[in-house]
Image (cartoon, rainbow, N blue to C red):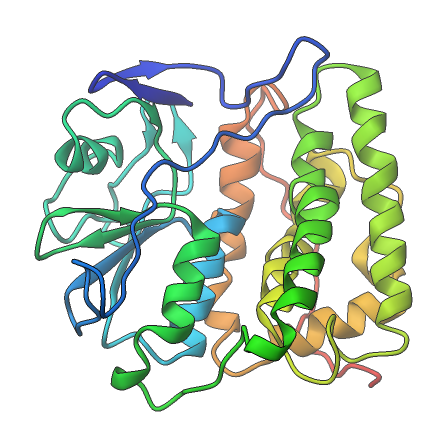
Amino acid sequence: MGEMINGQWHTTPIAKTNKSGHFVRPQSVFRHRIGQDSRFTPEPNRYHLYVSYACPWASRTIIFRALKNLESVISLSSVEPLMLENGWEFGSSSHQDPLYNFNYLYQIYQKADPHYSGKVTVPVLWDKKEETIVNNESGEIIRMLNSEFNAYTDNKYDFYPPKLQKEIEAMNDFIYENINNGVYRCGFAQSQEAYELAFDPLFSALDKVEETLSRKNFLIGSEITEADWRLFTTLIRFDVVYYSHFKCNLKQMIDYPNLWNYLLRLYQVPGIDKTVNFADIKQHYYGSHKMLNPSGIIPKGPQIDFNQASHR
């Protein structure tokens, strides 16, 4: 709930909206790349991921680190689930900063750039060698994890293969605009018009994906791609928080037979369950968004079994 302005922390509303009440997502600032032709070369134990298990954007990077078996190559730590007056914080034994023992994530941004101005977000891909932020754009980080560290992992699978890149990009754009960001546009809308202009395309898009999955096992075809994991991080949170907290309450995931089976198949990919922390997810959304949930009460439910057998 704030941002850095000329190196100083300022508390600001957690969600920025325009004059019509529409939610506007800020752009990432650090956009360097890891590569053999970059000053940031692929090396084991050089890079660190700062994440939140609550954040769907950061969860993309947690997932790709697990999928590509990079846990011993790239270290990781998580901030606390609550994001309050000082933004993302470190604190408890399971949510510490192992590199500098900082109390707040904005201190990481300050270390990279003492005069940084902008939002303080996760994920952050940190270079321990040069002590700076390489990148804080999740879509670019997962591409680097997908391809740039193959020399240090036994999993060479390509989730962004050249022959499918145009299809993946088109699907990513569709999913982001209507679903990934669509739930936020519903939840953070500050007018009835803004809410309904997000709500209807969200469920229209879910209907379209439901129909697509009646013919395919995954979004692009028979193999899992980057597009599936970018959708997964929204779907896994949908019934738990978006349905009620963000007022996305036309249908639940379990009301879509194909989407539900698809979600189960993705969740049951080896190692993925460990990347999902429902306690952090619920505590973050219901506890951090005081304008949506002033009491801060965190619901005990719903009780969902994501390990049940799918019907396909």
For residue 103, above or below residue 118: below
For residue 223, above or below residue 55: below
Instruction: Tell me which corner region of the image, top left, top right, bottom left or bottom right, holds residue 107.
Output: top left
Q: Residue at x 37, y 69 (%)?
A: 145
Q: Position of residue 271 (x, y in %)?
A: 47, 78
For residue 155, above or below residue 60: below
Question: Given the current orientation, which residue lies at the most extreme front position?
Answer: 37
Q: Residue at x 75, y 83 (%)?
A: 309
Q: Is residue 239 visible?
A: no
So how many labels did they put on this image?
A: 0
User: Which quadrant: the C terminus?
Assistant: bottom right
Q: Position of residue 100 (x, y in %)?
A: 10, 45
User: Which quadrant: the N terminus?
Assistant: top left
Question: Given the current orientation, which residue lies at the most extreme bottom position?
Answer: 154
Instruction: Tell me which corner region of the image, top left, top right, bottom left or bottom right, holds residue 116.
Output: top left
Tell whether 237 sits left or right of 125: right
Instruction: Tell me which corner region of the image, top left, top right, bottom left or bottom right, holds residue 143.
Output: bottom left
Q: Position of residue 103 (x, y in %)?
A: 19, 35
Tell whether 2 sits left or right of 77: right
For residue 270, above or below residue 191: below
In terms of depth relative to the viewer, which is nearer, 251 or 71? 71
Tell whether 250 sits left or right of 62: right
Q: Is residue 40 visible?
A: yes
Q: Position of residue 117 (x, y in %)?
A: 29, 22
